[in-house]
Amino acid sequence: MHKTILRGCYLLVLLILAACARPAVPDSALGVRRGPQVIGHAGSGFFTPISPFNALPPSSLGGIRQALSRGADGVEIDLQLSRDSVPILFHDEDLTNRTRAQGYISQHTAAELTRLEYTGGWPYDWLQHERVATLDELLTELAERPSFPYLHLDLHEHDDANFAQPYVRSPALVRAIGRVMRRHQVPPERLLILTQYEPSLRQLRRELPGAALGLEITDQFEERLQQAVAAQVEAVVLSKYVITPERVARAHARGLQVVVFGGRSKKAIQRLLGCRPDGIEVDNVPQLLSLLGRRGRPAEAVPQAHAGAPKGGPLR
């Protein structure tokens, strides 16, 4: 009885904190009409207790719905390949931290994986009942929307289940994504496909002509920037720990658009905005929209290109 009361009190405190963490009215200096494309990072982000409170798992269908319902222009999702070559929405390297299963995505069939329920521990599992989903399920649902959202597909190609050849299944993942995209007739201009594995880029060009490609940079900025230029991708995707205004300007000067991922607090998101990227894969969609003065308005109402940014590209 006492444990039940304590749990109820704890949940009430969390809900109060979540309400208090709602985005503030934007500062006049940041309530601008021009701004970056707003992309929900892994849908609505990751399990967090406050700033913002989020009870939904990363790259889950519920998290994606939440980001879009809050006004995001699109979502970033993480893709891995099942044992029977089905693209699966899943962020972590293995199943242990997010489900009650063991092993890796590549060791299970799609049928086995889609029966798995997410777990984030208490109190999140009181508030979410999500399960692992396929890319096919997501696209079927998105096709029913009035307009197709932007999709940033983050390919998780490194497979720890195969230490000797961790990227041996990368070609199969690219082919499988191409098949699903063509079957659903996804508009290529709404796609940005992200990878850290440079050899996949040439195959992606063949499988998904017209889709924009991005090379992810989490360290060694200068070296990776040169690789991106040589690979003729449309964008570089920078960690929040790597991005600076100077590096964004350097990428723009080389004809590349810049996406950054991360940002939960108002202060962190303000710093990212100050770097002037073309898109932000953000963990706190309402806060970013508030700082941009959009307050959940659709993307079409807001010009998205910054002065000095490359023309066209994935962040139209």
Image (tube, helix red, strand yellow):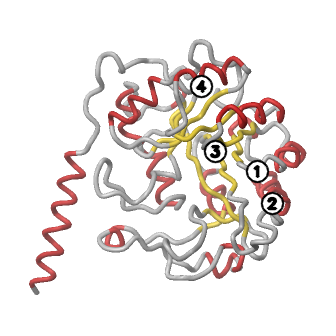
| Mark 4, other Cα within 10 Å: few <14 / some 14–19 / many ≥20 | some
Circle on res. 170? 2
Q: On the image, numbered disc 4 is attached to which residue?
A: 247
Secondary element under disc 2, as helix, strand or loop, is helix
Task: Please state which amino acid type lies under the numbered disc 4.
Answer: Arg
Q: Inspect this view and state whether residue 301 appears.
A: no
**Residue beneath the point at 29% across and 37% down:** 23
Task: Provide residue 207's location: percent of width, then percent of height.
Answer: 87, 49
Q: CA distance from mark 4 to mark 3?
A: 21 Å
Q: Earlier in the sequence, mark 2 or mark 3?
A: 3
Q: Is residue 236 above or below residue 6?
A: above
Q: Nearer the viewer, mark 2 or mark 3?
A: 2
Circle on res. 197? 1
Q: Earlier in the sequence, mark 4 or mark 3?
A: 3
Task: Provide residue 217's location: percent of width, then percent of height.
Answer: 64, 41
Q: Earlier in the sequence, mark 4 or mark 1?
A: 1
Q: CA distance from mark 1 to mark 3?
A: 16 Å
Residue in front for this viewpoint, 224 or 2: 224
Q: CA distance from mark 2 to mark 3?
A: 18 Å
Instruction: Tell me the quarter of the picture where residue 266 sits.
Output: top left
Q: Do residues under tags 4 and 1 come within 8 Å of each other at their CB atoms?
A: no
Instruction: Tell me the quarter of the picture where residue 95 sits.
Output: bottom right
| Mark 1, other Cα within 10 Å: few <14 / some 14–19 / many ≥20 | some
Task: Please state which amino acid type lies under the numbered disc 1.
Answer: Tyr
Q: Nearer the viewer, mark 1 or mark 3?
A: 1
Q: CA distance from mark 4 to mark 1?
A: 21 Å
